[in-house]
Amino acid sequence: MTTTKRNTIIGICITSFLFVCLMTNLFGLIHLKKNITSKWIDEIEFWLFLGLVLLTILKVEKTKLLLWRETKRKWYFYPLSVIIVFSSAVIVAITVPFIFKFLGLPINQSVLKSSVNFYCIDKMLMIFACLTAGVVEEFIFRGYLMPRLEILFKHGWLVVILSSLLFGIAHISGLSLVGIIVPILIGFVFSFHYYKYRNLIVLIVAHFLIDFASFITSC
């Protein structure tokens, strides 16, 4: 096994452990009942997590965060891609629950709905949460994870599928099957776009807009 591959595996293992700690609240420094303050802390913890991942990359992997060089495109590529990615995500978000209802399958999103109320009350928290999701999740699941999966598995289609599945599993805290399937499919759109075009800016903007639109419609 090459040094690069070994360091990559160790880095992914450490990052996975940190993420599990974050999502299970083992990573939390302060334990408070669910309120606006605790939600602010939750969002800030995501940035702390990103900082620890960067530290792991520097000290363990001894490389940089984005192994794929960002590809610059014509100006119209950016708004057009954001519209396409955003529209694809909206179609997925509408279609999957509709199919569940048509098949008579339960759609349990009570955990998500109870959490949304805090973001509806505090608009600054809402915007900060959308920014956090757009930046942190795209840097981790696309910018960080996909190039390293390619080092380990080589095949592009496998990289896209694995990163999509992991993105969906990361949303398991919502305790809803719909809340996992929808992120998997949206993650596929995002991962495919990043693998093909090597541009993270579009995905960060699209992710921000998707979450913002989701909050607005929920509120």
Image (cartoon, rainbow, N blue to C red):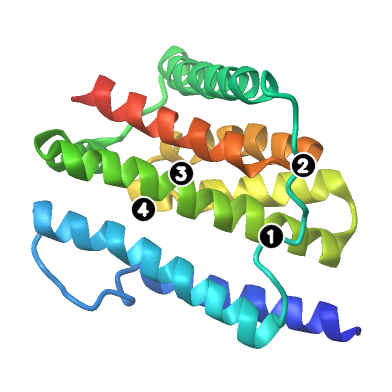
Quick check: 195 above or below 143? above
How far is mark 2 from mark 1, CA to CA? 12 Å
Q: Is residue 123 left or right of residue 213?
A: left
First along the sequence among labels 3 and 1: 1
Nearest the viewer among 161 and 44 is 44
Please name the residue that numbered disc 1 is placed on: 66
The picture quadrant where one finds residue 61 is bottom right
Secondary structure category for the residue under label 2? loop
First along the sequence among labels 4 and 3: 3
Please name the residue that numbered disc 3 is placed on: 134
Find out whether the residues at labels 4 and 1 contact each other: C-beta distance under 8 Å: no
Which quadrant is the C terminus positioned in?
top left
Which quadrant is the N terminus positioned in?
bottom right
Secondary structure category for the residue under label 1? loop
Q: Report the mark closest to the observer, 4 or 1.
A: 1
Q: Report the mark closest to the observer, 4 or 2.
A: 2
Quick check: 114 above or below 143? above
First along the sequence among labels 2 and 1: 1
Secondary structure category for the residue under label 4? helix
Q: Is residue 153 left or right of residue 63?
A: right
Badge 4: few (under 14), some or many (20 or more) residues near its Cα, within 10 Å?
few
Q: Residue at x 77, y 51 (%)?
A: 159
Residue 169 drawn at (x, y percent): 52, 52
In the drawing, what numbered circle is on residue 173?
A: 4
First along the sequence among labels 4 and 2: 2
Q: Residue at x 36, y 28 (%)?
A: 106
Q: Report the mark closest to the observer, 4 or 3.
A: 3
Q: Residue at x 77, y 42 (%)?
A: 71
Q: Report the mark closest to the observer, 2 or 1.
A: 2
Please name the residue that numbered disc 2 is placed on: 71
- Identified by mark 1, the residue type is Leu
Residue 97 drawn at (x, y percent): 43, 21
